[in-house]
Amino acid sequence: MKKVLLLLAEGFEEVEALTTVDYLRRVDIIVDICSIMGEKTVEGAHRIVVTSDKVLDEIKNIKNYDGLVIPGGMPGATNLRKNDRVIELVKEFNRGEKLIAAICAGPIVLQRAGILKEREVTSYPGFDNDLKEGIYKEDLVVQDGNIITARGPAVAVYFALKLVENLVGEEKAEELKKDILLDMVEKFI
């Protein structure tokens, strides 16, 4: 069974974090929600309090994880970027060629970790200036090797689907689209 670590800091974007957790768990991907705040409860950017499964000090190694997810939101992404242990985790996941996914302002964490050099990347509009080492794209979701980035809250569904596709296959992603009625919605767009 695939397993993912999702990091939360005070001020995270709730839609991006919780949509991703929900949709990954629907296809039996284990998601450990991990607070970097030293306690399990973390307040999001819109005052929604989430209880995480773990705190950062509990993550001793990443060998059992297949991917890392970094939601955006402000000041959540800034809080993640300032945390040296978070930066080391990003580097570790990248060295292991494990999946790393960041949405909205989240890619600023990847920039600080130094893993975006000449990699295609996207983010919430306006953060392109913070991602100078990458090759900036305005697509909704961008994948370059083991790195997936996405624009923001409205794209959270497609971000999660891209993770599902990478972790358990395109067939599971298509099943999820049907289960959440996204296939029906897309017929009207």
Image: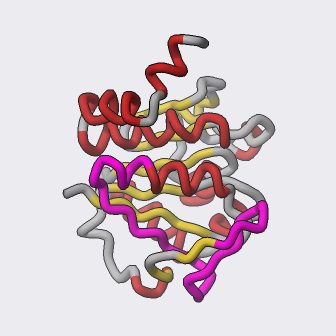
**Left or right: 65 with respect to 117?**
left
How does the figure colour the protein chain or chains? secondary structure
Which residue is found at the position 25% from the left and 42% from the top?
Answer: 168
Can you say whether 104 is above or below 81 in the image?
above
**Left or right: 60 with respect to 49?**
left
Q: Which quarter of the picture shows residue 188?
A: top right
Query: How far across and how far down the image is residue 31, in percent?
Result: 38, 62
Which residue is found at the position 46% from the left and 42% from the top?
Answer: 160
Can you say whether 74 is above or below 40 in the image?
above
Which residue is found at the position 38% from the left and 35% from the top?
Answer: 179
Relative to the observer, which residue lies in front, 135 or 37? 37
Query: How far across and how far down the image is residue 33, in percent?
Result: 47, 69
Magenta extent: 23-49
Q: Is residue 36 magenta?
A: yes
Q: Is residue 106 magenta?
A: no
Q: Quadrant of the N terminus?
A: bottom left
Query: How far across and how far down the image is residue 132, in percent?
Result: 68, 40
Q: Quadrant of the C terminus?
A: top right
**Left or right: 147 with respect to 104?**
left
Relative to the observer, which residue lies in front, 125 or 158? 158
Query: How far across and how far down the image is residue 164, in percent?
Result: 35, 41
Which residue is found at the position 61% from the left and 57% from the top?
Answer: 109
Can you say whether 145 is above or below 37 in the image?
above
Q: Residue furthest left?
A: 1
